[in-house]
Image (spheres, rainbow, N blue to C red):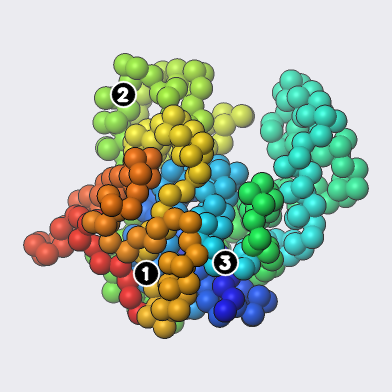
Amino acid sequence: MKTVGIIAEYNPFHNGHAYQIRRAKELTHADYCVVVMSGDFVQRGAPALMDKYLRAECALKNGADLVLELPVCYALSSAETFAKGAISLLDKLGVVDALCFGSECGDINLLMDFAKELLHETPVFKKALDRELRIGHTYPQARNAALEAAAPHLTAHTSVLTSPNNILGIEYCKALLSCDSDIVPCTVKRIGASYHDDSLESNFCSAMAIRESLRQAGTSDGLAKQIPTASLKLMEEAYLKSYPVFPDDLSLLLHYSLLSKAASGFTDYPDIDRELSDRILKFLPRYQNFRSFCEQLKSKNRTYTRISRSLIHILLNDSQEDLARYEEEGFVFYARMLGFRESASALLSNIKKNSQIPLLSKLADAEKQLAQTGLLMLEKDVYASHLYQGIVRYKFPNDDPSSEINEYKKPIVKL
């Protein structure tokens, strides 16, 4: 029995994602596909367009066999930490034979070459990196210059480092190497529109294009050719009932959180140094909404995405100390199920036999299965989901008394 792993956000699920699942199984001759998916918050520093259960069901209807939730602390982290958390989860399952991810270059050997150089930084690399950063270059510029100095054979290929899926793929490879995993990486070349393309012209458009269309047009019309048939009905039924959710829907909650924590500053949170903390305090009296505040705070050395991630860490009360504790004790401590196909019962049995961490299908069982650090991580995940569902209920009022906000009573998706 062979199993392939995919790390994803599916924000939202579209044709390109269905293609990747299909190709992943074909390339690796896998019987099953396990997806580790971001929950209700995603890596660009935003709430997911639609909730994790709907996105998990879309994946299951299009070839995934099991969908697990990536803990929110990693879902909202930089590419490096995002990759470490997700790879650790897949590796600890003890059943995943291969990892398949999308990339712009489609060359796994080249991506692995970059991963090895960046993981094992030579003295030449470090010296060149420090020099370039002192000059005032951004980290990507300094990293490229350092690679040219330390690995001249890769100089002709540094354009690989300008594409987001390539960068994330390199981080997956680094994470696999650093934990000495037996999981074999492979890549599917991205087809159709680029990651940042906001056009809906291609049948393989970007997730960004779909999100922007929903935000600007205020309708789900015109998305039929972008979404697999198996998922389209689900999305149409849920539209304006539980989604779309956008960053500005967090505006009031974030403002309250920033005001309530302003007295002590914000340096306890990931990626926030004294300079950024002071900048947040300086611009706080001008706060209008989430997106405009991120625009005010961004600078040459701090991107919009990095700032938005840090602000959501503040909102969710995820501290740098918590992240350090997780890393020190093993990164992940459970595999929380969001959904599975009943035809994958052999996969679930295999995980239960071989996994280093418990496979959680019921939150009520977690207290018996997890130590203190694992429970802390899980509590943060539950809080993030309750906060997200609160936003959904406020935006799309629902008088149904059975639709309460309670992760402990939320059933996982079964197909």
Q: Amino acid at mark 3?
A: Val
Q: What is the crowding at mark 2: few (fewer than 14 residues within 10 Å), some, or many (at least 20)?
A: few
The secondary structure type at the circle numbered 2 is helix
Please tell me which residue lies in front, 313 or 250: 313
Residue that carries the numbered disc 1 in the rendered image: 339
Q: Is residue 349 left or right of residue 80?
A: left
Residue 23: numbered disc: none
Q: Earlier in the sequence, mark 3 or mark 2?
A: 3
The secondary structure type at the circle numbered 3 is loop
Q: Amino acid at mark 1?
A: Gly
Q: What is the crowding at mark 3: few (fewer than 14 residues within 10 Å), some, or many (at least 20)?
A: many
Residue depicted at x 50% and y 68%: 34
Residue that carries the numbered disc 2 in the rendered image: 261
Please tell me which residue lies in front, 364 or 43: 364
Q: Earlier in the sequence, mark 2 or mark 1?
A: 2
**Residue 352 placement (x, y as % from top left):** 43, 67
Q: Is residue 120 left or right of residue 294?
A: right
Name the quarter where the N terminus is drawn. Answer: bottom right
**Residue 327 placement (x, y as % from top left):** 51, 39
**Residue 287 placement (x, y as % from top left):** 35, 29
**Residue 110 placement (x, y as % from top left):** 80, 57
CA gap between label 3 and label 2 equals: 42 Å
Does the image show residue 12? Answer: no
Q: How many marks?
A: 3
Residue depicted at x 19% and y 55%: 405
Does the image show residue 134? Answer: yes
Please tell me which residue lies in front, 138 or 374: 374
Front of the two marks 2 and 1: 1
Residue 96: numbered disc: 3
